[in-house]
Amino acid sequence: MKMTDSDNSQLSILSSPLIPPGYKQTEVGVIPEEWESLNLEAVCSMKSGESITESFIDEHSVYPCYGGNGLRGYTKRFTHDGDFALIGRQGALCGNVVGVTGKFFASEHAIVVTPKEWIEISFLTYVLSEMNLNRFSESSAQPGLSVSKILKISIAVPKNKAEQSAIATALSDVDALIESLDKLIAKKRNIKQAAMQELLTGKARLPGFDGNWEVKKLGELGIFLKGSGVKKEDAISGHLPCIRYGEIYTHHNDVIRNFFSWISPKVASNAVKLRKGDLLFAGSGETKEEIGKCVAFIDDYETYAGGDVVILRTTGVDPIFMGYYCNHTPINAQKASKGQGDAIVHISAAALSSILVLLPPQPEQTAIAAILSDMDTEIAALETRRAKTLDLKQGMMQELLTGKTRLVKPEVSHVNHPPL
């Protein structure tokens, strides 16, 4: 059957994406009619900073000095004064974006972004940070960005500077909340560290406890076992939780609270099954300072340990207390002194068994562990809140920087930039 012009028109409408009223299709996607798709060169200028040597950078001078990877230190003179965005031009972190206000020195490895008069620099800074500019880095001896190429990239821009400012203000409010959470988390961690220093050494005693502490060797607290049999490719082979030695460094602190590897029954048959109360030490590491990091296994789940995990199956001690205690500075110093090797450092069960510990009676161990666990719970809640706030910010950026959500009503928008 032959298609008529009317049929073709209807088919075209059905096959094209639906554009909401008040929006238009552009090369950067669907944006409000009051916005424009513009190359960066239409909204700002970009220029690399000045050359500077390390001898002119210190930690005590007046003006911050920025390079390709962010803040390098401080200098006695400045190259710029005002509100700008900086893009890392060279280095592993090239493409990173920071907003800078006041007097500062920009090195030749930083790109200084100067907005046109009708552009709000804080808005543009958020746009640039959302663009993942690192993906435009060019391969060479050192990764770098081409200013001329970046300036040709198109972005969506509200023509109303007041709308740009409103978007930037909303996002900066979220940034302020994230910063306040960062400070609170750091404060809580410092409080916990101070509490550990007092409680794990007996300098401060909890009410109701006054007995003597006893010196023992780790080897007197149970028997040592060695994990085995779990390769990297086995870590997603099934449904049984498993602890691998690398995860002790990257995912666990003091006590195992989550699992990140899951193995099959076949793989588990060659691994070591854990028991509630086991202490797990990382048997290999990159430095002597980190060797033998410890985590306590306190669950009843069927769980296994992979290779390079040294297991202390304890009796007569509180495992949560021991998880904290075995990562305490004096114990870490003993572990470091017993590490063997250079490029890869190892610590054996025999070496760990000889480490001296000063332990309170078990009821006091449990009371100390409860206090430190409560502190960790509070810190974890703050970290969860921070993660949710970061997700909120990301969602806001996707909505606000594309115009899907408007903070300035279209009918009151006022075009206040030169004709395009």
Image (cartoon, rainbow, N blue to C red):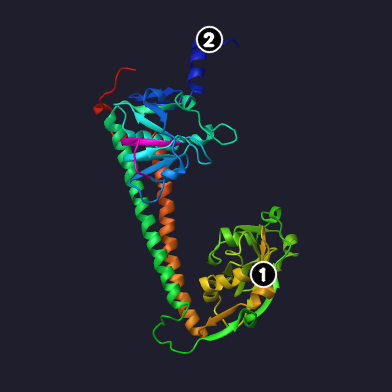
- The N terminus: image quadrant: top right
Which segment is the magenta one?
A: 75-88
Q: Residues within 10 Å of mark 2 (few under 14, many from 20)?
A: few
Tag nearer the camera, 2 or 1: 1
Q: Quadrant of residue 189?
A: bottom left
Residue under the image location 55 percent in, 62 percent down = 252
* Residue to which mark 1 is pinned: 310
Earlier in the chain: of badge 2 and badge 1, it is 2
Q: Amino acid at mark 1?
A: Val
Q: Give the dominant element type of the magenta stretch: helix, strand or loop.
A: strand
Front one among 130 and 262: 130
Whether residue 80 is in magenta: the answer is yes
Report whether 225 appears left or right of 332.
right
Q: Position of residue 233 (x, y in %)?
A: 70, 52
Q: Quadrant of residue 420?
A: top left
Residue 348's place in the image compared with 410, above or below, is below
* Distance between mark 2 and mark 1 Cα atoms: 77 Å
Residue 138 is at least partly visible in this image: yes
Q: Position of residue 123 (x, y in %)?
A: 34, 35
- Whether residues under marks 2 and 1 lie with C-beta atoms below 8 angstroms apart, the answer is no
Whether residue 350 is in magenta: the answer is no
